[in-house]
């Protein structure tokens, strides 16, 4: 018998409980022995839960689980930094294996946690921390181990992909769609982590650390969220043959690692443009395998529960068969993380100008003087005396673009730079 202590019974914790109950025979056969949830930690025991559960299992005292000699495996599904980090460390010190879906804790403290697990001869697994139900952590560590990974690009946040899809397809307002994403259990307890891109940054940090066998400080990742994406930009993107997606990128180049999260114009015929609603997708390029792409639900109770229970089964089987064969990817490489201003991209720009002769010529001169060449120019809905100009550039280093935008702001007829959005997957 393997006993589990569950920390958290929210969206994902409830999913794990349901799957463990429904598929218990199947799980027993895979592990080679019975697996039982012995105790569950919650914040509020009195909370009404829509679950068929014996209340005796539930506690508000973490010590009843973390210091419990009968518990072999701790599953952390509380979320956030603390006390989740503290409980994981205590559990590992008590020689209990740990499964978690906490991307923040793994991205920030992964090295400390992995070293502690290795030192104590126990396991740490975190498949549910990246891209919900899509198997990606273990495939990257194990199934693609023969490769040197060159690039990971993906849509790694379900909440923002859901919001952008509904704003695009149903012309809904940001705030209304965010509320639905929260009600569906996709968003973090503080949804600004999703909206401002941090959640995706934690995930690309975890994947890039594994892929490039290095330690990545999450603070070194350039992050921009979707808060400033307007309906106007979504509509112009559509007219120009693009959709707007929150893209996470980890690329290895000669001059360092290019790791970033930001909204991007993606051509409508690009595979990532077809990933909608709560779905995520991860594209990987390995030097032996070539291109691999995985697609599935990136958030939600049952998809994430699927990833967490798979980790439970593997950890429980290893405990049952006394298999200490836990594979830790060592951080043996040291890379420089490229500053975003050194990265070359195409850009979409929306600039509000006075509708006067000669304005476009002045604008083009400033851009040209700064090595920014234009792929297309469009004048939108003339509302004399002001007109929004839409420009798409050829690939250019961001520092040159930024310098030209600073100069443009000082031109008398430029009223505002309304939007600057990078274009991915279309580098002609
Ligand atoms: P959630 O619905 O907010 O559930 C959190 C659970 O933890 C609740 O049961 C809560 O107790 C308990 N809890 C919170 N703080 C606690 C504390 N200080 N002490 C004891 N218990 C505490 O969160 P979730 O959406 O399930 O997410 C859990 C983790 O999975 C997070 O790390 C999240 O990033 C990750 N994740 C979530 C998803 C998703 O789709 N939601 C997908 C992938 C990964 P009460 O029930 O009493 O309030
Ligand atoms: N809040 C996260 C998302 C949950 O929306 O992608 C899955 O990690």
Image (tube, rainbow, N blue to C red):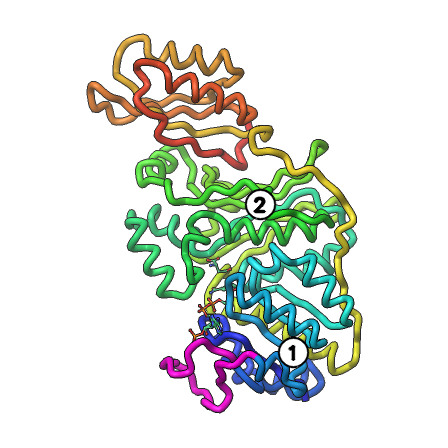
Q: Is mark 2 within 8 Å of ligand 1?
A: no
Q: Which residue is mark 2?
A: 219
- Residue 203 screen position, x and y as percent: 57, 53
Q: Secondary structure at mark 1?
A: strand
Q: Is mark 1 within 8 Å of ligand 1?
A: no
Q: Residue at x 59, y 30 (%)?
A: 343
Q: Answer above or below: position of 139 versus 150.
A: below
Instruction: Kindly identify which numbered label has been placed on residue 73.
Output: 1
Q: Secondary structure at mark 2?
A: helix
| Res. 330 in view | yes
| Res. 28 in view | no
Instruction: Kindly identify which numbered label has been placed on residue 180.
Output: none
The 10 Å Cα crowd at callout 2, few under 14, some 14 to 19, many 20 or more, is few
Predominant secondary structure, magenta span: loop
Quarter placement of the C terminus:
top right
- Residue 354 screen position, x and y as percent: 26, 17
Q: Answer above or below: position of 27 versus 56.
A: above
Between the C-alphas of marks 2 and 1, the distance is 31 Å
Total numbered labels: 2
Q: Answer above or below: position of 145 versus 312.
A: above
Report if residue 58 lies within the magenta region. yes
Residue found at the very far left of the displayed protein: 384
Magenta segment: 41-62
Residue 361's quadrant in the figure?
top left
Do the numbered discs 2 and 1 sit on residues whose CB atoms are within 8 Å? no
Q: Residue at x 35, y 46 (%)?
A: 168
Q: Residue at x 51, y 28 (%)?
A: 346
Q: Is residue 352 left or right of residue 12?
A: left
């Amino acid at each position: 018998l393997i006993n589990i202590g569950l920390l958290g019974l929210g969206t994902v914790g409830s999913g794990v409980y349901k799957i463990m109950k429904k598929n218990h025979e199947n799980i027993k056969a895979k592990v080679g022995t019975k697996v039982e949830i012995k105790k569950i930690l919650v914040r509020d025991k009195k909370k009404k839960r829509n679950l068929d559960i014996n209340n005796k299992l539930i506690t508000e005292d973490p010590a009843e689980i973390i210091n419990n000699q009968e518990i072999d495996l701790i599953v952390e599904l509380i979320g956030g930094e603390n006390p989740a980090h503290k409980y994981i460390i205590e559990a590992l010190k008590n020689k209990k294996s740990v499964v978690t879906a906490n991307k923040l804790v793994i991205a920030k403290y992964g090295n400390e946690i992995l070293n502690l697990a290795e030192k104590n001869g126990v396991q740490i697994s975190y498949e549910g921390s990246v891209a919900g139900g899509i198997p990606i952590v273990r495939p990257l560590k194990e199934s693609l181990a023969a490769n040197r990974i060159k690039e990971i690009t993906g849509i790694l946040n379900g909440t923002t992909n859901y919001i952008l899809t509904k704003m695009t397809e149903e012309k809904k307002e940001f705030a209304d769609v965010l509320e639905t994403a929260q009600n569906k259990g996709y968003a973090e307890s503080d949804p600004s982590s999703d909206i401002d891109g941090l959640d995706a940054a934690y995930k690309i940090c975890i994947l890039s650390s594994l892929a490039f066998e290095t330690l990545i400080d999450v603070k070194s990742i350039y992050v921009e969220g979707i808060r400033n994406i307007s309906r106007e930009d979504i509509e112009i993107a559509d007219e120009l043959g693009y959709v707007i997606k929150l893209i996470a990128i980890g690329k290895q180049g000669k001059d360092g690692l290019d790791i970033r999260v930001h909204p991007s114009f993606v051509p409508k015929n690009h595979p990532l443009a077809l990933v909608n609603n709560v779905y995520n997708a991860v594209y990987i390029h390995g030097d032996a395998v070539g291109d691999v792409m995985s697609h599935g639900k990136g958030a939600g109770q049952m998809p994430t529960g699927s990833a967490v229970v798979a980790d439970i089964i593997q950890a429980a089987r290893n405990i049952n068969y006394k298999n200490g064969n836990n594979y830790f990817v060592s951080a043996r490489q040291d890379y420089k993380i490229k500053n975003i201003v050194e990265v070359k991209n195409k850009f979409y720009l929306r600039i509000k100008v006075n509708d006067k002769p000669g304005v476009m010529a002045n604008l083009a001169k400033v851009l040209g003087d700064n090595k920014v060449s234009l792929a297309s120019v469009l004048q939108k809905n003339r509302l004399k005396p002001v007109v929004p100009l839409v420009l798409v550039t050829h690939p250019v280093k961001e520092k040159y673009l930024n310098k030209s935008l600073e100069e443009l702001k000082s031109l008398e007829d430029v009223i505002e730079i309304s939007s600057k959005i990078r274009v991915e997957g279309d580098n002609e």
